């Protein structure tokens, strides 16, 4: 693995343990303002964070932090050969479990259950989930075994196996091709990705890359799945966020329009009326009277 960091220091001894075809490493670290990192591995890896790391920005494109950055999520799967750049504007502490797995070992683990083709496809799809849930619980058990081994290695290996199958996007065999629809796991990834952005805006190319599909194929199956084009779906997300601002903040409609990337207040008002049936100001007044 190739990696380089600046402004990040380890705050406790690194704990690690080697198993069959994988290495589990638990890090506790502190990041300074302006800290950055670069990571690249020929094999797949999983990161499970035990605290909020949304203040860290990440990108998979060199020099793309300004145009293609997104907040770091709590559970991440990075396919083999995919680089990652990180940047942090604020100082904070964090801890995480890193699982470095040999890709052949992972294929041997998944193939008997899902088939070689589906296993290989899953290995190629990146996954980023903010709600770690069960993944964090399983990761905590792995950390316990890494820190103070108390059982046979097969126990920790089975925990890692559960993390892999719970996190990786493994569609039901033939689901995409036969039904022409996105899987629930793919929709979860899209929702997690778009919800992590301040203005709920992604290019169709970025949406397609998030779920591991070509742009043309993605556009077709997305409408089959949601009944909307990617642009219509994103507009709906932005209007939902506008509603939240109208209820929970004192921002003006013009301020909300600017924050959500609308050209001006009139643009937001037009789209809001089309989707909701009332202007933002009228809708806000109705909510305040209930």
Image (cartoon, grey):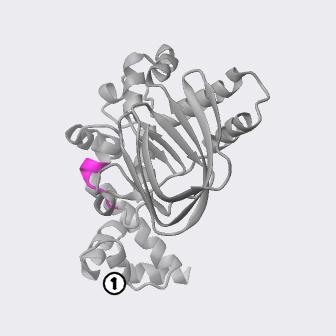
Location of the C terminus (image quadrant) = bottom right
Direction from residue 277 to residue 154 in the image, left or right: right
> From which residue to which does the magenta span run?
201-206
Q: Residue furthest right?
A: 150
Q: Is residue 44 visible?
A: yes
**Where does residue 245 sit, x and y in percent of width and height?**
46, 75
Q: Secondary structure at mark 1?
A: helix
Foreground residue, 10 or 237?
Answer: 10
Disc 1: CA contacts within 10 A as few (<14), some (14-19) or many (>=20): some
Q: Say above or below: 43 vs 113.
A: below
Please name the residue shown 53% across and 77% down the image: 248
- Give x and y (percent) for residue 70: 39, 57
Residue for badge 1: 254
Q: Residue at x 29, y 44 (%)?
A: 208
Magenta span contains residue 61:
no
Give the answer, above or below, for where 229 lies relative to 30: above
Relative image position of residue 98 (x, y in whole percent)? 56, 40
């Amino acid at each position: 693995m190739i990696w380089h960091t600046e402004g990040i220091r380890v705050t406790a001894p690194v704990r690690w343990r080697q198993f069959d075809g994988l290495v589990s490493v638990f890090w506790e670290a502190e990041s300074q303002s302006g800290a950055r990192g670069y990571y690249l591995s020929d094999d797949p890896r999983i990161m499970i964070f035990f605290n909020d790391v949304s203040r860290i920005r990440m990108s998979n494109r060199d020099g793309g932090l300004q145009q293609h950055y997104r907040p770091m999520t709590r559970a991440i799967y990075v396919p083999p050969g995919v680089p990652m750049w990180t940047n942090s504007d604020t100082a904070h502490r964090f801890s995480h479990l890193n699982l470095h797995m040999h890709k052949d070992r992972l294929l041997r683990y998944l193939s008997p259950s899902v088939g070689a083709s589906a296993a290989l496809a899953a290995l190629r799809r990146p996954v980023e989930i903010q709600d770690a849930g069960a993944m964090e619980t399983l990761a905590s058990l792995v950390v316990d075994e890494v820190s103070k081994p108390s059982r046979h290695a097969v126990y920790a290996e089975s925990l890692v196996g559960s993390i892999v199958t719970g996190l990786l996007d493994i569609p039901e065999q033939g689901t995409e091709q036969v039904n022409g629809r996105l899987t629930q796991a793919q929709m979860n990834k899209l929702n997690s990705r778009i919800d992590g952005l301040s203005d709920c805006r992604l290019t169709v190319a970025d949406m397609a890359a998030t779920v591991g599909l070509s742009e043309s194929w993605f556009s077709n199956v997305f409408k089959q799945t949601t009944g909307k084009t990617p642009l219509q779906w994103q507009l709906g997300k932005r209007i939902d966020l506008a509603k939240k601002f109208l209820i929970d903040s004192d921002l003006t409609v013009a301020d909300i329009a600017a924050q959500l990337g609308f050209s001006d207040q009139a643009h937001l008002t037009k789209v809001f009326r089309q989707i909701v049936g009332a202007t933002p100001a009228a809708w806000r007044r109705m909510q305040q009277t209930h």
